[in-house]
Image: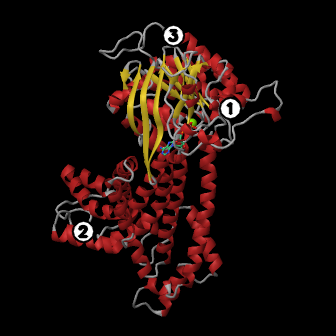
Amino acid sequence: MTPDPGTPGQTAPGQPAQAAPALDVAGLCVDVDTPAGRIRLLDDVSLTVRPGERLAVVGESGSGKSVMARSILRLGDTYRTTGSIKVAGTEVTRLSERQMSRLRGSTVAMVFQDPLGALNPLQTIGEQVAEPLRVRGTGRQEAERAAAAILEELGVARAAERMKAYPHEFSGGMRQRVVLAMALIAEPQLLIADEPTTALDVRVQEQVIDLLHEVSTERNLAVILITHDLGIVAGFADRVAVMYAGRKIQDDDAGRLFREPAHPYARGLIEAVPRIDHRIEHLVGIPGVPPHPGARPSGCAYHPRCPFRMDICEVEVPAERPLPSGGTVACHLFALEGNAS
Amino acid sequence: MWIVRLVSRRVALGVITLIALAAAVFFISTLVPGDPARVAAGENATADQIAAARENLGLDKPVIIQFFLYLGRLLHGDLGMSISTHSPVTEGLFDALPTTFELVLMSIILMLVVALPAATIAALRRGGAGDQALRTSAVFTAGIPTFWLALLVQFFIGGKLQILPLSGAVSRQYSVDRVTGFMLIDATISGGAEAGWDAFLHLLMPSAVLAVLFGAQLFRALRTEIIRVLAREHIAVARSKGVPPLTLVMHHVLPNSIGPAITILGVQFGMMVGSAVLVESIFALPGLGSYLTNAVGSADVNALLGAVLVTGLVVVTASLVVDLLQAVRDPRVRAAQNGGGR
Ligand SMILES: Nc1ncnc2c1ncn2[C@@H]1O[C@H](COP(=O)(O)OP(=O)(O)O)[C@@H](O)[C@H]1O
Ligand SMILES: [Mg+2]
């Protein structure tokens, strides 16, 4: 399949074909009912991703990154979702399950963390890569040709032959290429990669991130890279969103975020990144642990760990405010400094 | 080739199992009170006639020699003469087995037809009203004694309501010639579709009884495994690829969930043949059950040994079939048979 950056693979009737953001999330809240009562996993998250843009979503584990990814594809069956999620202009919260499965794969696709767990152990690689086309009615031979082509493009040598192999016969890095091929074969406009490299060793991690960057550029594919590892973000992302305790607390151009992180939590995260030029002892972490969604602190959820905490932080949830740099931040410090609009 | 390794390994194991089984049953049977020679010679036999029968049957030789003689004959497919029917045991078993297989296979089909969709629905809607109802009935049915359920069903459905025939393999009006020994097939050959349907109706109640008894365990195993598989990441991945719900269940969920069910069915197969003995006698089906009952009643050692050995053979074969099915289903099992790798 040749990349075709100009026109989207398919356009829903009545939707603008051009200029619609690849993703437009507004006021997204996700709750789940647990035996201990209803808890809020995502709280008032808004996020926009332009076509072809690479956004990294970072935050400690448990901050709600995967919940956000799953709720965009509507994979969380127990989620109670409010707010708006528009994927390439289509409001997915209002789609029927059938319409939703047609959208999955062809408009928005996903890559998961564990490349072995992501593959059906009983089906051949070829069957699985061809499947997004097969379920859309493409003939077997044509789908298999397309599968071989995209595997080859993603660096699986002798693809036509190895399509007959099963997942357990592939190495971790190769499996992640297969998973990526499955996600890309139906030519989506948005790819969500949820910690795609966490389960891989360091050398392979780099290869996969480079590959993601490459397909994103070649196909004008918008990518959301979810990670708790800031080390892989710098070379990859145009923009970074920082999540904490189910909220987005900062959203900024990648370069600026690394140079001058506004939110104290973002600052802590960046200082916690191990650098080659830093000795390990100098690594500054953030003391404390992120709160459980069922027991979030009042006001700004970060306040118990924040070195700059003020009285207001304990009572009032900070609103998102624009930064002079063009990003946004949700922190009372910036209201005081007069950045409020 | 994985299939050659698997089959040869399992057949060797099976032969050892069967010899051990033959030995166990044979030596136990020599301890059973009752004189086979007296039984064989008939009720009014003289002492000479009994002695002749004893020599004839090899019963005058030491027990260990009797056993090796028996094993030697086994190799030729000779299970000896039944001392009650005066016909070869092999012949008697050959007549009886198809009826039992028909009953057990029909039960398994009924079990699968009910348990697979029921377990899928229960797992997909777990915690819901349907799931609760199905689970409760599964707990309930698993506790019922075989004969009790068989009699109850026969009394109400066959007797009171007269929905299904009370007992027997086929109605008297159809004269069925034995071709395959499987009543459904033979009745259809002899009397056409109408007779075949009649035989099917006769088979329905006894096989449903067996299915109810064994289906609950299958249902629970399937439900548990489907729930486990639904939580796996590759299911979420398949959904994220745009696989619609029905395809998801058929291509991804069920193939990954039926492993434990296949193993359970393999174990149940032998147990079902055992339970079929009881069900056959209640529903007057001429299967292995009635053959075994006769053999025990008349101290017919050869017939008893033959029937038990054949049951053992069925169990061994069932476990081979299970291993084959698992290997066909799962490429990792095939790889393990090949000693890993390709
Ligand atoms: N279905 C669910 N029910 C209850 N809690 C959940 C559910 N899914 C996720 N959570 C909780 O929500 C929080 C955020 O989870 P997640 O999005 O997976 O974090 P991460 O940022 O590491 O991807 C975690 O504390 C997790 O335990
Ligand atoms: Mg996660």
Q: Tell me if I can see residue A200 in this picture.
A: yes
**Residue B160 x, y percent position in the rendering:** 16, 71
Name the amino acid type tagged 3: Pro
Q: Which of the numbered marks, if any, corresponds to residue A241?
A: none
**Residue A14 x, y percent position in the rendering:** 29, 15
Q: Which of marks 1 and 3 is in front?
A: 1
Q: Which of the numbered marks, if any, corresponds to residue A268?
A: 1
Report which residue position mark 2 lands on. B167
Name the amino acid type tagged 1: Gly
Residue B31 vs residue B163, the one in the foreground: B163
Callouts 1 and 3 in the same chain: yes
Q: Residue at x 43, y 38 (%)?
A: A30
Residue B58: quarter of image = bottom right
- In this rendering, the answer to whether A1 lies above or below B165 is above
Residue B275 vs residue B198, the one in the foreground: B275
Mark 1 CB near ligand 1 (8 Å cut): no
**Residue A328 x, y percent position in the rendering:** 53, 22
